[in-house]
Each structure stands twice: as C-alpha cells, then as structure tokens.
Amino acid sequence: MNAIRFDPLVSLKEALLKAEHPNLPVDGPTPGESFVSEGEAPAGISRRSLLTYAVSAPVMTMAAGLSVPGEAQAALPLTPPDITDFYDLGDAITQSSLPTMPLVRLSVGANGRVLFELPRLESGQGISTALAMMIAEEMDVELSMVDVTLSDARPELLFNQLTGGSTTIRSFAGVLPLLAAKARARLVLAASAQLGLPGDQLITVNGSVRAPDGRKLTYATLTLAASLIPPPLDVRPKSASSYRVIGKSARRIDALDIVTGKKRFTMDTPVPDAKPTMVRRPPTILGTVVRVNNLAAIKAMPGVAVMAETFGQAWDAVNALDVTWGGGTIDGENNASITAKLKATVPPFLVPPILGVTLDAEFEMAPLSHAALETDCAIADVKMDASGRPVSCEIWAGMQSPIAAAQSVALDLGLSPTAVKAHVVSSGGSFGRRLFWDPVQQAAQISKALGRPCKLMYHRADDMRHGRMRPPQLHRVRARMLLGQVVSFDHRIASPRLDTRHGFGDLLSAAAVAAPPIIQQTVGNFAVEQILFKTMVASPYNFGVSNKLLLPAPIIMNTASYRSVHIQPTRLVEEIMVDEIAKALGKDPVAFRLSVLRQPRARAVLQAVASAGQWGKVMPKGFAQGIAVHQETRSYTACLVELDTRPVIAGTGPALVTKAVIAIDVGNPVNPSGIDAQVQGALAESISIVLSAGLHVEKGLPLEGSYSQYRFSRNRQYPKDVKVIIMPANGEAIGGLGEVGLSASSAAIANAYARATGTKVRKFPLFFPVDFVPFPPGKLPNRLILPVPV
Amino acid sequence: MTIQNFSVNGKPVSVDAPDDMALLWVLRDKLGINGPKYGCGINVCKACTCNVNGKAFTPCSTKVSSVRGLDITTIEGLAADGKLHPVQQAWLDLDVSQCGFCQPGQIMAAVALLNRTRTPTDADIDAIDNVCRCGTYGRIRAAIKLAASRMA
C-alpha cells in the first residue's frame, strides 16, 4: 500500500474508509447463534425449521496482481503503478462490506430449499445466478434448489448494500463459499449424530447426506437438528479442482419466470390501492413550478403529479395541465455551449518541447441516457395519523442504494429511518441509473400529498429528458514521444460535476443526500468524485509520466454514474490515441500495444483476439479491422471488430459492425454463460454509444424522448458473427464483469472507423444528426393509435 | 360506462373502459396482466408486444375498442396447457434473457415471425425492431433459428 502515499487523495480515501459508524457491529453474531427471528422468517416457514448461518469468515484482500517488468520492458519509460493496481473501488467496497457480512443470511428451509437473502440489486447482470452457483457448489444441491431474494433495505448492513462498480461477485467471492461450506458442515454433523457414523464417512449429494451403507437423509429433514449445532471451525470451501458447478455455464435462475411473463418488476408489484401516477415535468432540466393555471393541484417538485386509475389516463391528464414554469439550472444551454464551458475548464497544454514528437488531441462526448427498458419508477405508501402527519412509509423500487434511499425518504417525511421500509425489486436494467432514487422520493412525496399509495412511473420521454444522464465530456490529451517511445501521456477530462450522493462515501451523510442539487458543487462531492475517479480509472500502459486528471465543471444537471462511469470515455480516448501513436511511430497497433502493456494478462487477451480474429488480414474496400485492449476492476479484455463503412460512404447511415471477437479474463469464471452475456451486452452498448446514441441538449433540455430518437442498437445493428473467448481460470482473484466490457469494444469500433475512412475520430457518437421532430418541451408525446393487424 | 368484451389468452374478459383507452393500460392497470411491459407508449420499443390473429402488435398503441371480439395472446398465454412454446424453450436453452424486461415482447415478436414463416432469414430477424437495452440480440437471433428448426 505504500505507493498510495504518492497521491494526496489517499488521506481522504483512508479517512473515508476508516470513519467508523457508531453502530458498526465489529464482532458480528457468533456462528450458530444467529437463528432467524420469527419476524425474519419467510412466510410459511416456521422459525424452528430454519437453519440460518452467519458468516465469520475473514476475507483476504484481493491480490494486487502486479507484474515485475520483464526484460523486454526494462528499457521502456515505465509508468509507476497506478492506484488501482493496489487498491480500487472494488477493494473499497469489499473492505467496507466485510464488517457486516456476518449479518448476511443464508438458510435451509424445511422443504430443503436454500435461501440466500442478497443485499444487492439484480438488474439483469446475473449476480443472483452466479451467487446461487457458489452456494450450490459448496452445499451439493442442485442450482434449482437455491433461491436468491433481494433483501429489503437493512440499515445495519451499512456499506454492504450498495450495488455498483462491478463489485458484487468480488465482494462475495471470499465470503459466500465459506458461508455455504459451513452450512453443509452443520448438516453433515446433524446427519452424523442421527446415523451414528463419523462425519468423514458421509458424503453430500444432491441435497442429502449419504452413508456408505446406502442410508440417506435429506437436508430438509436435517435442517432443524443442524440449526442447534455450532459450525465446526475447520471448514474450508472446496478447491477449484473439485468444482462441478462453478465454471460451467448455468442458465439464469429467473429464466423461466422471464419467458413465461411471471417475473415481477416494480410496476408489477401488487400493492393494494397503489394508483398509477405520472408527473408533468418542466420544459427545461430542473425547472420549477410557478403555478398550475387550470387546476388547484399539488406542487410536487420538480413537476406536477397526476394520479389516475390507469397510466393512460394519467398521461392524458398530465398533458392537459396548463402550468407556468420557472427557470431550470441550464436554461439556454446546449451541447455546444456546455462543451465550450468544459473546454474553458481544461487548462491548455504548454508549448511542446522542440525535441521529440507531440500528439495533441481533443475529444467530445455527447450526453448519454441510461435508457434502461424499465423507465424510472417507484411505489410508495405513506401512512399518516389522524392529524395527517406521516407515521411510516413503505417503498418498492429497483434501488442500488436502498439504505440511503430509505434515509432520504425518512428525512423528507420527517420520519425516523426505522419507520421507512424499503423493498428492493429486481429492475429492468439500471446501468448506474438506480444508484439514485429520485423517483422513490417523488413517489413518497406524492403519496403523502394525496394520502394514498402512489405508483409512480416516468414516461419514456421524461426518463430520457428528466431522468439522469451521463453528462457531456471534453477530453484533452497530449502524448509525447522521444526516440521511438512514449515518454509522457497527459489526459485531462472535463465533465459537469457528477452527483455522487449515492452513498459510496461517509463524507456524504444522510443530510447531504437530502440536500438540493447544489450539493453537487460542494467540497464533499468533489472529494468523493476524485476518489471514485482515482480508484477506477487506470492506464494499462507504460507511457512514462502518465497522468489522468478529472476536472469537474460546476454545471448543475441531473447526472448519474453511467456503466463504467469515467472509465469508458477515458479509455476509449486512450485507445484511439494508442492507434495514432503507433501510426506515428510506424508500428503495428497490436505489436506496439504488446510492447507497452504493463500486465501479462492484458497482453494475453490482446493476443487471443488478434489470433482468433486474424488481425491484419486483407479487408475489402470500405471495411477495416479495429482492435483495443482494456483492464478494469481486476479483469482484462480485448476486442477486435470488423467494420463496414459502406453505408457511410453511400450516405445511407452509420457504419455497421459485422464481426467481433472478444476475449475476457475475469480471473476465475463462475458462469461462462453469464460472462458471455455481459460482454455481448457491452458490445451492443458500445455499438450504440460510439456510432449513434447520444442526447442533444438544446435550450436546457434533451431533444431525444424515445428510442426512435435516441439510437440504441437493434437486432440489425448487432453483428451476426460474434466470438467470445473466456480465458480459463488462472488462479487470480475474481474480477468485475458488469462494466469491463465497454471500453475495449467501443475503442475497437472507433479505431476500425478511423482505419476504414482514414479520418481521426474525435466526436461521439460518430453519427449524430437531429433527423427527427422532437416532442414539445414540457409535454409528453401524443398517443399513437394503430389498427389491429388482421 | 363502456363495457369492452374481448378475450385474453382464450378467456373472455369484460371490462369497463373508454373506447380510446390504450389496450396496454386495460391489460396492466385494469386486468392485472403484467407480462406486457411499458417502455415507450408509442410503438417504438415494442416491450408490450402481444399477438392477435397470430400477428404481433403493440397494445400501447392500440385502442381497446379495436380488439373487441378478438382473442389477444400475451406472454402469459403462450405456454398452452403448461407446455412451453418452442420459442420459450429456445429462449431457455440459449439463456437469452438478461434483465428480462423486454423479453416478453421479444418472444411474442419471434412467435409472430415464426407464425409467418418457419424458415426465417437474417433479414426477417433484422426487421424485428424490439429494443433490448441489455443487448441480447445475438442470442435472440440464435434462439429464433433454434425454435424455427424445432418447429419445422
């Protein structure tokens, strides 16, 4: 950890981590003593039939995976190890989750089913399935016998109920196998007593304990007895060589529910009397209500809510409202004016030295909508006493930070935090959006104002315009080369200040959480933003003096973390520069990368795609290959694409990715099917955000209001030839997965475009016309009526 | 009071709703049939895709009165007699879904395509415009082809 001293931010970070909560349960419950109470038992299962386990596992800090420079690299201008080499956001989350891991619950029911109450949000990335596989592995039960539910907000879990930074599997990988192994050990001990045989003569198979003489006891019959046995101390999880579940593709545990329409999302949750509600939102971002001219109605910031019997009626009523609006925070601004402010935020580079070669470049990124298929939504039920004062509140939503969400609702309503119960519901995508819970607060405010449960849903147009976004960015880069080598790489990034009030830092107290958007401009927010940047964004190269600087600009808009936050744009830019540097040095992009990559695992994934994708093969006119490599959250990936730019040449549309080869090294693959799914999904997202998807902010509001205008890819844009190479388990710790897939695939597409067209790519998305009629600001689109097909 | 009579998944329903109410709200908010999802309301994302007359349509952009007397199939009605439709089975076998929100619509669009042809081309699949934000397009294509081969 000593290298961290290089950075002045570390003291802040350490303060962040060391700040102890007064209620921190340092010693946790002793294993064997933590039987679930009546109130915690799932419906229909009695307390005495349950066996619940507590974790008491120490978790080793993830190995840093640093490499010693080899001989080939010894002559390179080496870049000192990056902070993320030693300590990244995932480590921070793993460490801060650890003290409360003893409170995480795994139980065996009288029906023999294993239940894990996961304090995270499943938003489609497969965390529930991967964790269920770990449990099935250790307990010798079929995967179909493991249930994973999303835990209600549990304030006692502190930092152990945040979903983000691709950290869930990393955080649980050191804990859950031991937890499950202890559960199995207790079941074996119970069986041992009943069968009169020593435990070492018993084996566990398919949810039962078996004796050599053929006798068999199911877990269902053993759970009560096992619950009275303290776990043995000498339990160890299985060794990787005996895995039968981990490392083999498994289907999502919710797959059947999905294909039969049974999977419930927030708006499908049956809450009695919860009424469909929509909000009339302002014509500019963060605009305010002055008055409602045609209705004595509620003023619920930042819009006017309408509750109805159906969402269709709420939609009509919202459009019928006549509202006078006050100004917002960026009225009159547009992408160009914001970009100009960002340019002014980045100090210009000095005149370059005469010696050597200098490459300067500037890149612009348009804002992005998270555009999850499930729009922003929440259900809230505020109960009031006779005098109309709130006494309790129940909320349902897809929340990545449910503890902070519940706390902020409590503050809004003047309730004690314990009076707010937050149910976490599996969400229809998130991509970082649901780290923030503004829909939850709005639903609670509306429920309070109207005195009945509120089922709040954003129209898609509002989700894109008034939901949160990845703000526009400006990148300024200078690479200096001397004697054929890169001796410095300076990368400055300006972006409207990102809201970090998602609970990732102690610096952000519950009070700050409830503060208005201006808090984004405070020192606390700045510190957390810098820590997040420094613990996430890294360069994989030996580029001598390498520096990345985040320069947040005080522009108030609805920002949020977006999948891979600052990493994807930063690494996209760097990988484009690497191609341009290689060209300037007269080197092949792959050979050059291999000569300057710091980590062997990065070189391995690059070589894998270069080989499988036949790097350098002759391409027809208008086509080109592009390649890039990336490391993030202790995982490594490379991507090679083939791009068809003939549509561009013909003036008929964006380029088409026709082929992709992706290699991914997550250290220890748990579910290859899930890994393949995540990197393919990232490819679809990269195709979108590099080529066609972006928001045009115009007069303080995005023009885009639906998927017909915000060009996320469809079937026809996704290549028909995709090969995913999952690197075999290599003894390294499990890395992150949910975000790592974006950077290499987006950079490979950009680099292919540059090679195919002989141009330099500088503005994203590459194809970004306003070729649609925007919906009127402040209004939802009109309904569309189509005939029934016959 | 305007009573709308039609069938959903073979069962007759009778519901009080104005003629011009979009069928999606009748299904979701009045009948509690939640398989069809809201994603845009204007026939763009197609997350609510259902079938009528064996063809795909979007209830978000269809007046309830225009389905009077017709039988609507939602994702919930696809597994006749509890036996999965070949498209559902292919979706399971290839583990297509991620978050699952768009998948009822994707599956209903695929079923409608296979009602039209048992030998769908890549161009036929390209014409399916349903958005999948998670990016399951590669597996969707493979699953449609797998289901087609099993139905042939």
Image (cartoon, helix red, strand yellow):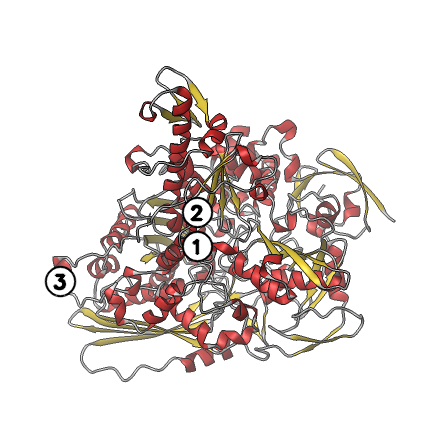
Residue found farthest to the top: A213
Q: Give the number of the disc on residue A74.
A: 3
Residue A759 visible in this rendered orientation of the protein: no
Residue holding disc 1: A25
Q: Position of residue A479 (x, y in %)?
A: 27, 73
Q: Amino acid at mark 3?
A: Ala
Mark 1 in CB contact with mark 2 (< 8 angstroms) = yes
Q: Amino acid at mark 1?
A: Pro
Please name which of the two marks, 2 or 3, marks the residue nearer to the observer: 2
**Tag 1: Cα neighbours inside 10 Å, few (<14), some, or many (≥20)?**
some
Q: Quadrant of the N terminus of chain A?
A: bottom left
Q: Position of residue A562 (x, y in %)?
A: 47, 62
- The chain under label 2 reads A
Work out whether mark 1 precedes mark 3 in sequence or the reverse, and give the earlier one: 1
Q: Amino acid at mark 2?
A: Pro
Task: Give the camera-side residue of B77 and A433.
Answer: A433
